[in-house]
Amino acid sequence: MESGMQKLVVVSNRLPAALKKEQGRWTVNPGSGGLVTAMAPVLKNRGGTWIGWSGASDPDVDVDSLLADFSKEAGYELCTVPLTKEEVDGYYFGFSNEIIWPLFHDLQTRCRFYPKYWRAYLDVNFKFAEVVARKSDQDDYIWIQDYHLMHQAFFLKSMGVKRNIGFFLHIPFPTPDIFMKLPWRWKLIQALIEYDLVGFQTIQDRRNFVGCLQRLMPEARVEGRGAVVTVHAGNRQFRLGAFPISIDYNQFSDLAKRPDVARKAFELKEALRHRKIILGVDRLDYTKGIPERIRSIQTLLRRYPDLKGRMNFVQIAVPSREEVGEYKDLRTEIEQLVGRVNGEFSFPGWVPVHYHYRNLPYDELVAYYAAADIGLVTPLRDGMNLVAKEYCACNNSEDGVLVLSEFAGAAAQLQKHAYLVNPYDMDGIAKGIHRAFHWSKEERSLHMSKLREQVRKNNIFWWVDSFLQAGIAKTLGDFPEVET
Ligand code: ADP
Ligand code: F6P
């Protein structure tokens, strides 16, 4: 940690390293998902402590010694919160994945509002808060990440523990009509207003939160304008901000330039015979719109038969939440769709869809980004979507096109230079891809250079600085505007 800097204590459900039992042995794997991609460079840069669950719920595992090497190499302290299998089932698979995740992504029909999930969520939040209290002191800045842990400030206060504490939500915040369906809506709002700062990905998310707050507390008042505002609600005064999360731009761009990675990108193009590459990269999640995307490729090939044999769609999916039934069903659905589209269009020497279901090492993932002519990012709803930003950072040739869902948080920042599509509109996506194919070299380079400039400027270090400035500063200065 740099001298004179306040110590940072980051708290999230997952640590950047996850323990997994493989063939009877526990192994340490890098965590997946946007939260880890974004936060890991921040802790590496500043030092501090990261508190989270290890991914293991077996009481006999010696978690600390398994994570010791990872922590030493990372340059910051890792501290685990042990959770039993029952706790993981209720709080993580239940409350987090079957209630908040679908509800906040506008997919309320997938929610199972079981009271036992709510109780498990509260118990685990209390357990986390006890660890936070023990592992931090009054001068530290406590930064809680994401929807699994919304009750941290509430429980710390109820224990009489005073901390400067901020919360950042990585996923969207829903509109009042959707949020009001939550049986524990009032308790959740009461918990969120106990933070000193609550941060969202976009101004729209922040507006949605204010809408919900004012439905439940009509007297709540917002003061100020710009990215960070002050809220007065009952006896509470706290800050609210929009801080679009980002990536370590240089890390991605430099990795794409490394000779071995550039060679790998070239080999990929050669293997696909220099056909146009359309690339999708996601955790395998129903919010990512992968089946709709594959259907849009089917529509593309039906509507524009001249593209047969001239393009490949490569979908890379990282396994996620594999224990959950809906994720298993989604995997089957995707595999069947890939088979169906390939069955309809393949001919000797050409298979349109290439599908990889695995976690790729970063250099390989970056080689795919660098090789792709079109980055196809079409979530049905997404807090931000870092894949869109990673694709731009790796496109050093400035020759690619980003086709982006209008319902990804990233669209607020990237809309002027990405080709925006409605992820539910298969015809629209097909048309967008077809148009993107016909953009001139000048058009591609103009738009991609602007996208890259935006991601380079508003990178992960800009994000962390703006959040901490809003969290620590006594008075609110001029905050850089964020795109709405
Ligand atoms: P989410 O947070 O919902 O997972 P994001 O798009 O914000 O969505 O972040 C996904 C992260 O996971 C990105 O940093 C991306 O590089 C990483 N990722 C996605 N697919 C793979 C894969 N197959 N192998 C390795 N990393 C992946
Ligand atoms: O970015 C959203 C998020 O839910 C993170 O909080 C999480 O780490 C990531 O997606 C991956 O999901 P999970 O931790 O459930 O595997």
Image: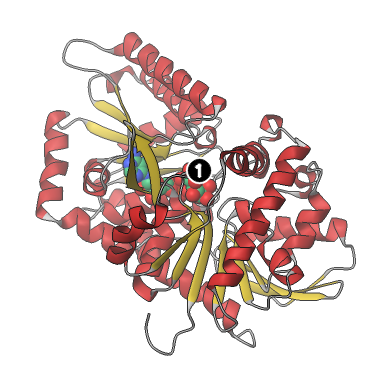
Q: Nearer the viewer, residue 20 or 97?
A: 20
Q: How many marks?
A: 1
Left or right: 429 with respect to 373?
Answer: right
Residue beneath the point at 86% across and 57% down: 216
Q: Residue furthest front?
A: 60
Asked whether residue 341 is in view, the answer is yes
Q: Is residue 251 left or right of residue 289?
A: left
Instruction: Categorize mark 1 by other alpha carbons within 10 Å: few (<14), some (14-19), many (20+).
Output: some
In percent of the image, x 43 and y 47: which residue is there? Answer: 33
Residue 385: tell me if it is visible: no
Type of amino acid at the residue the image marks with label 1: Ser
Question: Colour scheme of this structure image?
Answer: secondary structure
Left or right position of 155 against 54: right
Can you name the residue that lies furthest to the bottom here? 4
Q: Looking at the image, which is closer to me, 350 or 141?
A: 141
- Quadrant of the rendering where the C terminus is positioned: bottom right
| The furthest residue to the right | 219
Q: Is residue 129 above or below residue 329?
A: below
Tag 1 secondary structure: loop
**Who's the residue at 59% across and 38% down the image?**
93
Vertical position of residue 297 compared to residue 69: above or below = above
Residue 446 image position (x, y, % from top left)? 31, 56
Up-down relation of residue 483 to residue 347 (above or below): below
Residue drawn at point x = 42 percent, y = 55 percent: 36
Q: In the image, residue 441 lies at what x, y percent?
A: 24, 47
Between residues 298 and 186, which one lies in front from this camera angle? 186
Q: Is residue 472 left or right of residue 345?
A: right
Can you say which quadrant of the picture contains the N terminus? Answer: bottom left
Up-down relation of residue 414 to residue 131 (above or below) = above
Where residue 327 appears, as percent x and y from the top left, is: 51, 28
What x and y, as percent, mark residue 108?
70, 35
The residue pinned by badge 1 equals: 57
